[in-house]
Amino acid sequence: MACVRLGHSTSYAKGAHLLPPELTAPIESALVRSLDESELRRALCVAVDAFAAELDRNDQILSARLRPMLLELGSVS
């Protein structure tokens, strides 16, 4: 979504390397370090937070509608 917003190529994430560090740095934490359940949940929460933040930047009305579901997804236990 950030690539679309900033006018970069979206095909096969070809524009991802052009994104500014302030957008990509938080997403690096979403990389999974192990297959432990707690680690997978941690990475999922980071990814959901990053998605929600980008959704806020793109479409605040849709973001407001999806936020409760995203919060639920990020807090699955």
Image (cartoon, grey):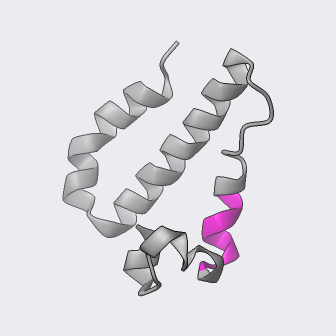
Membership of 21 in magenta stretch: yes
Q: Is residue 21 left or right of residue 13?
A: right
Q: x%, y% of residue 62?
A: 21, 54
Q: Is residue 61 left or right of residue 52?
A: left
Which residue is painted at 46% across and 82% down in the image? 9
Which residue is painted at 71% across and 62% down in the image? 25
Up the image or down, 11 lies above or below 45; here it is: below
Up the image or down, 36 lies above or below 73; here it is: above
- The answer to which of 25 and 12 lies nearer the viewer is 12
Which residue is painted at 42% across and 28% down in the image? 73
Q: x%, y% of residue 50?
A: 53, 52
Q: Quadrant of residue 33?
A: top right
Q: x%, y% of residue 41?
A: 61, 25
Which residue is painted at 41% across and 32% down in the image? 71
Q: Which residues are magenta?
A: 19-26
Up the image or down, 53 lies above or below 68; here it is: below
- The answer to which of 53 and 15 lies nearer the viewer is 15
Q: Quadrant of residue 72?
A: top left
Q: Quadrant of residue 39?
A: top right
Query: Farthest residue in the right direction?
Result: 33
Tell me the quarter of the image containing the N terminus. bottom left
Task: Look at the magenta stretch and give its main secondary structure.
Answer: helix
Query: Farthest residue in the top direction?
Result: 77
Membership of 63 in magenta stretch: no
